[in-house]
Amino acid sequence: MTILIRGARIGGGDAADLILEGGLIAEIGTGLSRAGARVVDADGLVALPGLVDLHTHLREPGYEASETILSGSRAAAAGGYTTVFAMPNTSPVADTAGVVEQELALGEAAGYVHVQPIGAVTVGQKGERLAELGAMADSRARVRVFSDDGSCVWDPLIMRRALEYVKAFDGVVAQHAQDPRLTEGAQMNEGTVSAELGLAGWPAVAEESIIARDVLLAEHVGSRLHVCHLSTAGSVDIIRWAKKRGVSVTAEVTPHHLLLTDELVRGYDARFKVNPPLRRDEDVHAVREGLADGTIDIVATDHAPHPDEHKSCEWQAAANGMVGLESALRVVQQAVVDTGMLTWQDVARVMSAAPARIGRLDHAGTALRAGQPASLTLYDPAPVRAFTREDLRGRSANSPYLGRELPGQVRWTFFRGKVTVADGTVEGAGVPESTARVSA
């Protein structure tokens, strides 16, 4: 199908027309026409490269009650994403070539986004011995990002060996920075609110100490390190110091750490229970500044779906995690675009180009130019409305934004020239998962 997009503001700039054909952007200009093309009116819409999420939990295989690769792909498309990196804490853990190739194939079958598997650093994510890093790198999935996310690679020798190993194929170790001894029994951020509520505190130093150790290890072995879901002012300072020192380190922040604070825990609503925990207002401002000045490289969702029974319970028993794919772009607009800290060109960098570069995906995050893959999203920044369950396209509803007013709406998403979201509606929505696929 040939698609003619009329009047889109590319990167938030001047309006232009785009012709999508054969899975590529065939032409960009003004006053374009093409006989027989499907016409999309994009007047007032911002055209961004298809978003890339470096930190998504799709739960399959093993935890399909929370999410499947198909349902998670639908959620991603609804949020403007065309590529997601799937975290390995599945069952079985994605620590072999066979599991990552299965995930890749399931993503291809769904057809909404490119699902790029992340491999575990250690066998079973137990932190005891290295997983089959080379085999996963050489597999059809071409894994380049490795993480025990959900579990910190706490042993410094194991972490050093992993950093050394991935150098051979230009891989990166993505660390979940959490000292397990400093967070035993922790329930929320350690601070004034935790003291008032009587909940065990999760100190900032538990994150910061691991980051400090790992940037020094990365410098020592000359390897690439990526820090997952950075959340404290001290962590921003450490990354800033490491980059000035020339260490090959990148870092991500989640949308929720850009907007929400630990004050929300006062209601004991488990939708706000997440790892790392929501921090102080001072930390929110610090991570915003870090994203704006380039210390923090990307925004990643840490989309973590859970069934209702894992959240509709007392705080201490509830699972950590929030869904975030459908809301990410709207939250980023509210936190850093509407506040003047980032432009839409910056958003394209931190939510598309940079995550693709860190993950070494040449076909994702590409600029909107003729000859590039036709993976893009058309976003309307104007409306402001409450985020509701109807906005969710995955299997779980553990969103911290339900009922909250958020700006913007993803109107169209195109994945390699295919329409996955049309005028705000996900293609195939309402069709059973067993039969729903995006047709070519």
Image: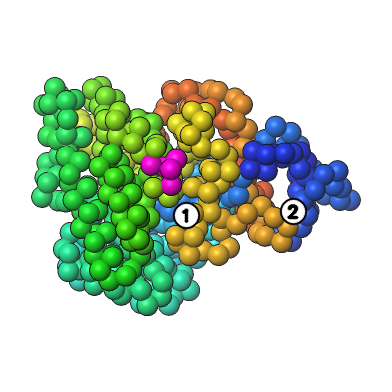
Select label 2 or label 1 by which is in front. 1
Which kind of residue does numbered mark 2 sit on? Leu
Q: Can residue 258 be seen in this view?
A: yes
Q: Does the magenta stretch include residue 355?
A: no
| Image position of 45 (left or right of 188) | right
Identify the residue position indicated by label 1 in the image: 355
Residue 20 tag number: 2
Colouring rule applied to residues? rainbow
Residue 254 tag number: none
Give neighbour class at mark 1: few <14, some 14-19, many 20+ (Cα, 10 Å). Answer: many
Which percent across, then down, holds residue 261? 30, 29
Which quadrant is home to the N terminus? bottom right
Local SS, label 2? strand
Q: Residue at x 17, y 64 (%)?
A: 156
| Image position of 430 (left or right of 177) | right
Q: Which of marks 2 and 1 is nearer the N terminus?
A: 2
Which residue occupies the foreground of this view, 84 or 16? Answer: 16
Q: How far apart are marks 2 and 1 (CA)?
A: 24 Å
Q: Do the residues labelled 2 and 1 touch (CB within 8 Å)?
A: no
Task: Give the overall secondary structure of the magenta segment.
Answer: helix
Give neighbour class at mark 2: few <14, some 14-19, many 20+ (Cα, 10 Å). Answer: many
Which percent across, then down, holds residue 398? 36, 35
Eyeballing the image, is 206 above or below 160? Answer: above
Which kind of residue does numbered mark 1 sit on? Pro
